[in-house]
Amino acid sequence: MNLEKLAQQAKESISLTEELQSLEQWRIQYLGRKSALSLFFNSLSQLSIKERKSQGEKANKIRRQLLKIYKNKKDEIEKSNLAKNDNFLDITQPGEKQIRGHLHPLTLVTREIVSSFEKMGFLIIEGPEIETEYYNFDALNMPEDHPAREMWDTLWIKSKLKNQKSKMLLRTHTSPMQIRYMEEHRPPFRIIIPGKCFRHEATDASHEIQFFQIEGLMVGENIALANFKAIVSEVIKDIFKQRVSVRFRPSFFPFVSPGIEVDIKIKKNQKPTPSGTKGSKVKDEKWLEIMGAGMVHPELFRRVDYENNRWQGFAFGLGIERIAMIKYKINDIRLFFNPDIRFLEQF
């Protein structure tokens, strides 16, 4: 067998190889167990000792050469394939969709409401969620044993602090910031206070142990309910961006006089009817309460040392969950506090 001719043939063949699949076929042909070189090694036992030694050394040398060029060729093809994959860009293929986060619906509604009041010159103020009994109740005309306290199911906080003048609690409404702000600021001013509140009550589709409010307070000279009605009507129109009826009805809150509640009714748009037919009347949605409000009680002004009979103002507490449920047609308040990604992805 002519080993030099076999080696030359193998080198010429591998130089034409450009794929790993054809390279594997080359390896089987020239280095496999049934290759001519392997069969030559099996036939060495038939030669004399002298010929066996010389021919064996020559065959081993050629085998090492073929193994080396096989390894080099394999590395070359793999690097070439890797470079092709890195540089290849098929512009006809659709791009991968990027996963984006979603703002919580309560965050969206809060931002809309805050933006609406900001347009009218209201400042945004924040207050503590852990409050004292004085600011949460006493300063708002609800002393101990006042029957109105039953409206606020309170979560009290045990404290080991000595000489503590007022018990601590999780605030039941954002109204304590009325007193806190008026103690440090003189009129005129207009502020809103968004924040979380807590009440110890059973949860159901319309009640939660935690909820968000936006407190509003406007104090100045010659402020009347007419100012409140105009501002609130404009804000509601801006939030819902559709036909909304607003209703004001009497109510009672210890820290306002007179007290009112604000209801809204979202009006459905009537669809045009075909010519020659009678159009049916479109029924409106039912009235829905969205906030409590009223003129600031004179006793609150006296507590913060405002001049008698000079300043007037109105205050209100707007439920953010209620607005979000109406705006997005959500029928269960518990969904807002359930970390279900399927719910959040809709906003």
Image (spheres, rainbow, N blue to C red):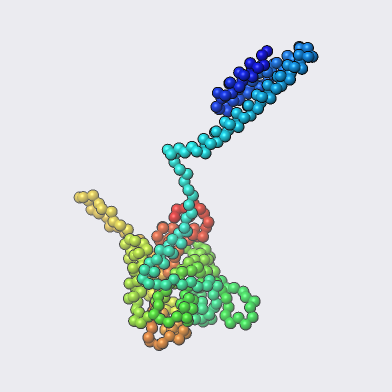
Q: How many marks?
A: 0
Percent across and percent down for residue 58 are 71, 19
Q: Is residue 259 visible?
A: no
Q: Quadrant of the C terminus?
A: bottom left
Q: From this viewpoint, which residue is outermost toward the right?
A: 49
Percent across and percent down for residue 41 are 72, 17
The one of 266 and 66 positioned closer to us in this rendering: 66
- Residue 292 quadrant: bottom left
The one of 101 and 65 positioned closer to us in this rendering: 65
Q: Quadrant of the N terminus?
A: top right
Q: From this viewpoint, which residue is outermost toward the left?
A: 276
Q: Which residue is located at x 42 percent, y 84 percent?
A: 298
> Horizontally, is 89 left or right of 232 in the view?
right
Above/below status of 49 relative to 342:
above
Above/below status of 341 relative to 175:
above
Percent across and percent down for residue 180 are 49, 78
Percent across and percent down for residue 268 are 32, 58
Q: Which residue is located at x 43 percent, y 39 percent?
A: 91
- Residue 59 quadrant: top right
Q: Which residue is located at x 62 percent, y 74 percent?
A: 158
Q: Is residue 296 visible?
A: yes
Q: From this viewpoint, which residue is outermost toward the bottom?
A: 308
- Residue 261 quadrant: bottom left
Q: Which residue is located at x 53 percent, y 66 percent?
A: 209
